[in-house]
Image (tube, rainbow, N blue to C red):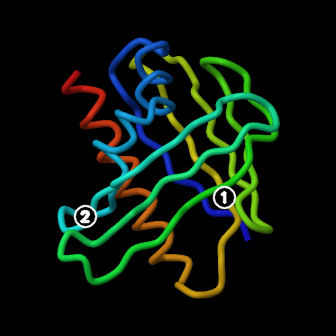
């Protein structure tokens, strides 16, 4: 099953793209709630390149790595990637109101679809707030 979340960011597409793909920015926005943070991020943004981020509870009680491989990169427009046996797609669509960032991904079995949707949407909302603050 595919899950899709999206947000519209009121900024030029180049700025939105840069914030989504730069490790220093990723560490600032990549969390679903205030009690989590991303402590490390790496990006090799090219077809066949890899990415990873380390997400941890701020109290140190839990953490995990999110990593994968880029399968298609179209600057300012599209990122496709695999993570484990799952696939993700990020679209950057320029519109009159700004840039719609749409993330679609294969659901996993550990959490409900709604929990996954809420978590990924919260991260995307943090991303939008981060870009607007730049």
At x 39%, y 74%, the residue is 63
Judge the density around disc 2: few (<14), some (14-19), many (≥20) Cα neighbours within 10 Å: few
Disc marking residue 105:
1
Q: Which mark is residue 63?
A: none
Upstream in the sequence, badge 2 or badge 1? Answer: 2
Q: Residue at x 33, y 54 (%)?
A: 39
Give how far apart the Cα atoms at labels 2 and 1 are: 20 Å
Of the 4 image quadrants, the one containing the C terminus is top left
Depth check: 35 or 44 in front?
Answer: 44
Residue 33 image offset from top left, x and y in percent: 25, 64
| Place of residue 111 in the rendered image (x, y in percent of width and height, measured from the top left) | 53, 84
Mark 2 lies on a secondary structure that is loop
| Depth check, front residue: 41 or 11 | 41
SS of the residue under disc 1: strand
Q: Quadrant of the N terminus?
A: bottom right
Residues marked 2 and 1 touching at CB (< 8 Å): no
Can you tell which mark lies on residue 33?
2
Image position, residue 21 (x, y; %): 51, 31
Q: Is residue 62 above or below residue 6?
A: below
Image quarter of residue 3 = bottom right
Q: Answer with the quarter of the image where residue 37 lies.
A: bottom left
User: Vertical placement of 112 versus 6: above or below?
Assistant: below
């Amino acid at each position: 099953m595919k899950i899709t979340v999206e947000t519209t960011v009121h900024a030029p597409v180049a700025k939105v793209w840069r914030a989504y793909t730069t490790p220093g920015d990723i560490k600032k926005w990549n969390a679903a709630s205030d009690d989590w943070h991303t402590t490390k991020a790496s990006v090799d943004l090219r077809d066949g390149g890899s990415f990873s981020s380390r997400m941890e509870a701020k109290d140190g009680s839990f953490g995990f790595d999110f990593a994968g491989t880029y399968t298609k990169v179209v600057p300012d427009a599209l990122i496709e990637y695999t993570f484990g046996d799952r696939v993700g797609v990020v679209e950057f669509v320029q519109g009159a109101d700004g840039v719609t960032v749409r993330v679609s991904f294969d659901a996993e079995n550990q959490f409900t679809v709604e929990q996954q949707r809420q978590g990924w949407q919260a991260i995307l909302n943090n991303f939008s707030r981060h870009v607007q603050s730049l």
